Every structure is written in structure tokens, then in C-alpha cells.
Amino acid sequence: MSYISEVLAELDARDPGQPEFRQAATEVLESIESVLDKRPEYRKNAVLERIIEPDRQIMFRVPWIDDKGVAHVNRGFRVQFNNAIGPYKGGLRLHPSVNLSIIKFLGFEQIFKNSLTGLPIGGGKGGSDFDPKGRSDHEIFEFCRSFMTELYRHIGADIDVPAGDIGTGAREIGYMYGTYKKITDRYEGVLTGKCLAYGGSLARTEATGYGLVYLTEEMLREKGKSFKGMTVAISGSGNVAIYAAEKAMALGAKVVTMSDSTGWIHDPAGIDLAAVKEIKEIKRGRLSEYKNYRPKSEYSTSGRVWQAACDIALPCATQNELDANDAAMLIKNKVVAVGEGANMPSTPEAQEMFVKNGVLFAPAKAANAGGVATSALEMSQNSQRLSWTFEEVDARLHGIMKNIYRQTAKAAEQYGHKDNFIIGANIAGFTKVADAMLAQGIQ
Ligand code: GLU
């Protein structure tokens, strides 16, 4: 049995029933085979066995009382996966689908993504199966306070620095930060994605979406193409999708679709982003309202955004949202490039189809790393007790994304997989962490 098969068999025996984690682990392990052949010391030092086993997995009860006086109990998670290159870093997802498999897949991805940023941050992730949809501001506060009442003892500015993810934005981070400060009396950069009034970084909100477009633009440029004049399909309507749309438009593209969990909009004349921002960021409403702003657009609760003809697809909603049928539709419509804004949005079958059909494919670990990279810049500003201008943060973000593209392309080519950025990102992200683990001994 090969080293990789042995490690995956062990994972199946120990953690059955974790399909998302299995999927993420398989993708990384299978794509680093050529590295393992060249570097036998990784096997000798059980690097794979150690990297797939989190340093620590914390699960806890989150009790809270709703506005009617009814008590609820949710489950909270923080998986501290790997801190070989820096303090654990990764977001908190608040969504009813959250379970240990999902948090482990996200934490595992975060190890390699954070490594690719070139900044000193390890991998972690957390969250809860709490559903924020339809909850009042007071209920959100009650939940966040209860969640942090347990989480505070496991985190710290030099230990583990959580941030936002699906369901967790500046409001939730604010309530959690207030609770952390109240309990510990420490004023430190323990969370990122804070609002500007108390230590947040300019450009953090825009960072994941902008970074996705910067990296995709780099990949296109290499082939003599760009966003200019391209039609772009985007899924999702959270901050990744909104700011990917904003940057794509700024580079001369036309964005024609966006979606939320109930349906999707198709506006062939080009999405009115001010309308989407008003619906989503101000009213916290649903995309079905978009028709009130643009009567000629279409809103649909069936089908998928990927059926709209486009040159570039940017999946920015959630894991496994783009499957083999979607990939077939995109390929039939002659898609040129796919850039993943969400974490693991394409299924393994869809990924394989893009690679086989010569579609330029930027995997999430590389393409959506701009968010966490800017979180690391927020940590630097907090430690320095300084705040940088929007232009300064944005310029650093742009430089980081270009560097991620270069590292990824170089690793792919060096190991004989030119233009396969999935393999390139996994190899480049993995080797840095693995070398740090080797240097630190078997821990
Ligand atoms: N949740 C984001 C991600 O998936 C950001 C994490 C962070 O800023 O720590 O990378």
C-alpha cells in the first residue's frame, strides 16, 4: 500500500462519517505524491499522519435564550489544526449545516491556504450549528456572548485568532470581541474582521473578493487574457461575492449572476451592485427583492447560476456548490477560467473536468487566500498599534496574490504538472508547513 493510501485508510478507520474532511484530505494528499517520492524524510517523520490529525478539537455547549424567553442549545466548535508556522488562524462559521466534518475540512484547508499567503499564520477553524437567519439583533448578541464565554479560554492574540466566515461578519465579531474583553480584561488582536472603530483593518471586508479577482487576473494574464470585456457568473451574495463582482467590474468585466440560499438572479445587462449591496448589506434581505430595482432581470428559485453563459465563473457561495453537471454546462458554454472564492466549492469530479478540458482553474486555497492574508495584516497593525491606509493594505494584498500565483505556478511546473494550479497550490502550501514540522521535531 502506498504511504498516501495507508494514511487515508487510517483516517477512514478513525473518522468514519466525515465526508467533507475526507474529500479535502484526499485532494491534498493525492496531489503531493511526487513530493513524497522526492522527500522520504516526510514519511520517516510521519508528517502526513500528523498533519491530518488536529492539534486539538474543542466542542462545547452554547446555551442562549431567544426573545420569547425560550432556551436553545447549540454546539460550538474550534478545531486548532496546525500551528507549525504561526498561531492558529481561521474563521468561525455560523450555519445550521455546521458539524465536525465541515469544521475539520475548513481547518485543514486553512493550513495550506495560510501557508501560501507567506505570512506567519497556522490553520484553524470554528463555528456553530446556530442559524442566524431571521434572528433579532438581541438574539445574535445573546448567542455570540454565550459562544465566547467558552471560546475565550482557548484563544489569544499569539495563540489562536478567529475571524469571520459564513454567518459571521463585523456585527458578530464585535459582540464576541466585547465579551472576550469583558472576561479577560485584555485589549489585544484576538479576532480579525473587526470594524474600523476599534482595530479593524481597512480593506478587510473587500479583501477575499478583491484577492480572488487579482489572482484570477494574474492567471489570465499569463495566457494573454484579462477580465476586460469578459462575462462573469458569480454565485453567492455575501462579502466574497459582492467584492469579487466589484473588482471584476472595475477591471472591465460584466457580472451577470448572483445567488443566495433561496434563488438566483440573472441580469444580462450587468448586475446593479449598488442594489445588491443595499439588499444584502443594509437591509439583510433576500435577492428576490432585486427585481424591484431591475424589473428586466430574472429571479429563479430553480436551476443554477452556472447555466448562464459566461467566460469566467467565480463560485463564491459554499462547499460542493458546483458539481459535474454544472461543470459540463460551463464547459459547453466555453468557460475560459474558474476562480474559487468559497472554500472547496467544486466537487472533485468538477475539478477533474475543468483540468481535463483545459479550463484555467484557480483552486480556493490560492484564490480565496486574500481574506485571511488581510486578517494577518490586521494582526500586524494591532500589534504595532497602528492602522494603515486603504491603499497600503490593498497594495500589500495585491502583492500577496501575485506572489501566491507565482509560487503555485512554479510548484506545478517544477513537479511536472504545468498549469495544474490545484497540484501547485497543494505542493507549495504543504512543503512550507511540512518543513517547519520537520525542523521542530516530532510533536
Ligand atoms: N473565513 C475566511 C477563510 O476561509 C477568513 C479567515 C480569517 O480571516 O481568519 O479564509
Image (spheres, rainbow, N blue to C red):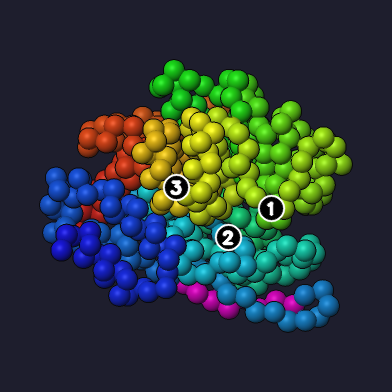
- What is the secondary structure assignment of the residue under circle 3? helix
Counting from the top left corner in percent of width and height, residue 132 is at 70, 63
Q: Earlier in the sequence, mark 1 or mark 3?
A: 1
Q: Residues within 10 Å of mark 1 (few under 14, many from 20)?
A: few
- Looking at the picture, does residue 166 appear above or below residue 268? below
Q: Is residue 104 visible?
A: no
Magenta stretch, residue numbers:
58-65
Q: Relative to residue 326, is residue 111 drawn left or right?
A: left
- Mark 1 highlights which residue? 302
Query: For this rendering, which residue is in front, 189 or 391?
Result: 391
The nearer-to-camera label among 1 and 2 is 1
Type of amino acid under label 1: Ser
- Mark 2 highlights which residue? 93
**Residue in the picture at 52% in, 63% down:** 126
Query: For this rendering, which residue is in front, 115 or 363?
Result: 363
- Mark 3 highlights which residue? 350
